[in-house]
Image (cartoon, rainbow, N blue to C red):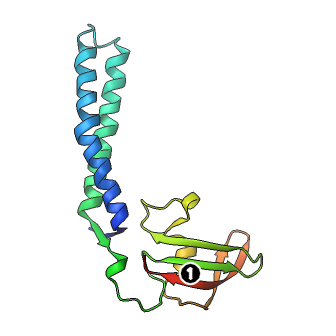
Amino acid sequence: MKQIPMTLFGAEKLRKELEYLKNVRRPKIISDIANARDHGDLKENAEYHVARDQQGFCEGRIQEIEAKLSNAQVIDITKIPRNGRVIFGVTVSVLNLESEEQVTYRIVGDDEADFKKNLISVNSPMARGLIGKEKNDIVVIKTPNGDVDYEILNVEYL
């Protein structure tokens, strides 16, 4: 199976969600199902059907997280030699040469990506364009509105 790159933070976040689902959410759903069964006829028992649906979603998410963690390639960026290149896990500051807008991104795994927090997926066009480049390099990123030129201002291994 294909290895999934993940930061330490991303792996820990998934582990916490898995622990919550197994130790809090799953027992609550089981209790809800038991309580709904006590209300009688299961065919017309909306509470029972809702609880069963929740159980299905919960069990599916547990399996999904366990699969991701078992195939995770957890990368601790602080232990990688600092050669100044943009790689998975780094924090990179770029300058849009057209708009003069400066933005700082962290390149993370697909599950960790959150554009509002400037966490971009390693598979995004921006990250793919930046990977392998160094400080002061000019990078052309293809966007739906055309090519955009960026200058790499800083690469940090945080």
Image position of 75 (left or right of 38): right
Residue furthest to the right in view is: 99
Q: Which residue is mark 1?
A: 129
Q: Residue at x 26, y 36 (%)?
A: 24
Crowd class of label 1 (few under 14; some 14 to 19; many from 20; radius 10 Å) = some
Res. 2 in view: no
Choose between 79 and 34: the one closer to the eye: 79
Query: Is 40 above or below relative to 116?
Result: above
Instruction: Say which amino acid is labelled 1.
Output: Gly
Query: Is 137 above or below relative to 2?
Result: below
Q: Residue at x 42, y 59 (%)?
A: 111
Image position of 152 (left or right of 15): right
Image position of 23 (left or right of 131): left
Q: Residue at x 33, y 67 (%)?
A: 8
Give how far across and how far down residue 88 sits, in percent: 42, 77
Res. 53 in view: yes
Quadrant where the C terminus lies?
bottom left
Give how far across and how far down residue 84 sits, in percent: 47, 90
Give how far across and how far down residue 147 sits, in percent: 70, 78
Quadrant where the N terminus lies?
bottom left
For the residue labelled by badge 1, is the local secondary structure a helix, a strand or a loop? helix
Query: Is 65 above or below relative to 99?
Result: above
Q: Residue at x 28, y 48 (%)?
A: 18
